[in-house]
Amino acid sequence: MESNNAGSGVGSTTGSSPSSPPKKKANSRRTSEVWDDVELFNVVDDDGVLLEKGKCNFCGKIYKAESRLGTSTLKRHIAVCKKLHQPSDLRNESIGPNCITQEGFREKLAICTISHDYVFRCVEHKGNRDVHSYLNGQAKPISRNTHKSDIVKIHERMKEELKSSLQKISSRICLTSDMWTSLTTRGFICLTAHYVDYEWKLNSKLLSFTHLPPPHSSYRVKTTIYRMLREWGIDNKIFSITLDNASNMTNMQNELRDQLNGQNGLLCDGKFFHIRCCGHILNLIVQAGLKVIKDGIRSVRESVKYVEGSEGRKIKFKECVEQSGMKQTRSLWLDVPTRWNSTYNMLERANHYRQAFVNLARMDFEYNECPSSEDWEKIEVLIKFLKPFDEITKLFSGTKYPTSNLFFENVWKIHLELRLLCTSLDDDIRAMANAMMLKFLKYWKDYNLVLAFGVILDPRYKVAFVNYCYEKLGGEYVSKVEDVVDDLELLLEEYKNQSATSATQSGVSMTSPSVPLDNYTAGFYASNINHNTSTSSELQLYLADPLIPAFGDIDGVSKLLPFDVLQYWKDHQFRFPHLSKMAKDVLSIPITSVASESSFSLGGRILTKWRTSILSDTLEAVVTTRNWIRGYQMDDDDEDTRDDGEEVKLLE
């Protein structure tokens, strides 16, 4: 005899016999906005049929929610729900200024998921729901689809706020862009904006993280990036774009420059538009040199693989370390061959335990990859040689401070170092330096003039430093300082013309600088500016000022003094109205695409082999919104660390 225990209460799932299971109805995709405020659940009727019901998240009333019935009834209820439309601070029975609302609860959950890369279904986990109910019995549990909808809403809201902010800033915007292939073989392209805001603070904002199906031709990439710029309303505010050295990206920037020039969107017809990623160039330069001593590097790599291959070998290696009179305070490092500085880290770690590897070769007859004494000597020389390159790469990869003013000095140091090593008595080092010099001259022979502007606009160096560097190089470089100054004046004249045009169109004085409304001294400075000062004399006035000391005595040692170049131009913006505006844009130029590559690291943590079905639009919403909320801040579990707790950062 069939038993009839069908429950009539909410969420009952009993009432059908084993011989006649409930008939499930097809779950069609719910797209109406009403599902943001209504929670779906199932009940079983007396006939054993599974029915869908909808409960208002605010008043708890229950309605039929069969797909064939539509959503009209639910919409009418939401429109008149008293609990929903009463003041938010009265929706809960909690008393006090910090009472929890359902909207606030859902937004906090969404921001938590965005910030820490949680899966959407975490809101449906029983443990989470128990915690929420324990903290506040008024909190209504939500489904993963509602949670996803909340995340998208936050994304859209923050996007509009950022879009409005970008359109209002007076400075131009520098871009970085790069491409990435996920583990699902889907191609993505990202676009990052770098600019100095009204407070003279450097900002880096990820604008887009978009799925880009093949082919990844220059035209397709250009069309995609131009569409992004139009969508954000900044296609007439671009100063430069930093790209890697892929041929399609090089061709793309030519096409994009022509398109932006067609609408007068670039300065000086885009002469200073394209910036090559210094990180990628450094990688190409060093990789060319590493090929010369690849056999020694291969021996170290295989040695590390051997030790890390089993727990027993690790224990034996630790014993060898102790026999050599050392403590294993640092773990071994296995490199990524395409990233030169990870190879540097591997060699530096292995050389630290050089004697331990020698001891291991004596104890373990299966270990036959130990580098020879000659190889170890070459590796030690190589580590000293690569250390300055490693330091410069990390310096170039910063996102919280301007880097364009650091380019000229450090590239010049690399040039001098390579010249010196090309005369080394060691055949391998000399061959390596010659190979690197060929790559160096291919990409940096002209030192990228627009980045030479950065060091001139640093009041610690100016033109005198550029002239000093070129004189040290000698030959054809001696006359290049004139080219740099001529191009600087050309760009500055463009700023003067643009300022005059915009001032005429807006009907304001052409000589009054744009200042924040809360600056009480703005009127004084504006009224005391020499209205007849020409652009060239403004530059000459700046260059005539004495240099700001770069080094000073700190604890009895001569060290580089801390200096904020943006703060300097903020303090002098009224004295040099056009020059300061140009400095704001030039100092915004990122000299590497590290910011864009950081977004791919985040994308890889979200789009894992356990989460491959996430939609591209949803992935973009999570990745970009996380950047807007937290910048490039990483959690402790996001960092690539070793067991000694030391952070390891892979930079190209």
Image (tube, rainbow, N blue to C red):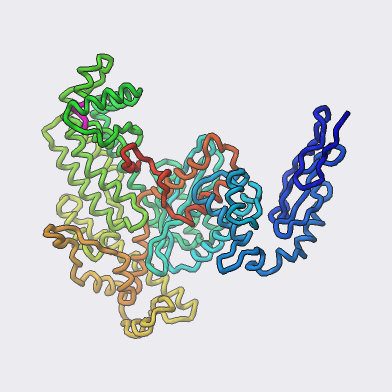
Pinpoint residue 426: horizontal percent, then vertical percent: 13, 31
- What residue appears at the point 55 percent right and 58 percent down from the top-left corner? 230
Residue 572 in the image, given as x and y percentages of width and height: 30, 73
Picture residue at 35% right of the left edge, 33% below the top: 336
Picture coordinates of residue 217, whole percent (x, y): 51, 41
**Which residues lie in the magenta part?**
351-356
Apparent side of residue 60 relative to residue 607 in the rendered image (left or right): right
Quick check: 46 left or right of 547? right
Q: Is residue 354 magenta?
A: yes
- Residue 196 location, quadrant: bottom left
113 to the left or right of 345: right
Residue 585 sits above or below residue 208 on the image: below
Q: Is residue 217 above or below residue 563?
A: above
Task: Look at the image and tell me whether residue 257 can be seen.
Answer: no
Q: Is 584 colored magenta in this rendering?
A: no
Q: How many marks?
A: 0
The percent position of residue 266, horizontal first and vertical second, equals 44, 61
Residue visible at 35% across and 64% down in the picture: 491
Residue sitting at x 41%, y 52%? 633
Visible residue check, residue 374: yes
In the rendered image, which quarter contains the N terminus? top right
Magenta stretch: helix, strand or loop mostly: helix
Look at the picture and state if 66 lies above or below 405.
above
In-front residue for pair 458/480: 458
Give the quadrant of the C terminus: top left
Above or below: residue 452 compared with residue 492: above
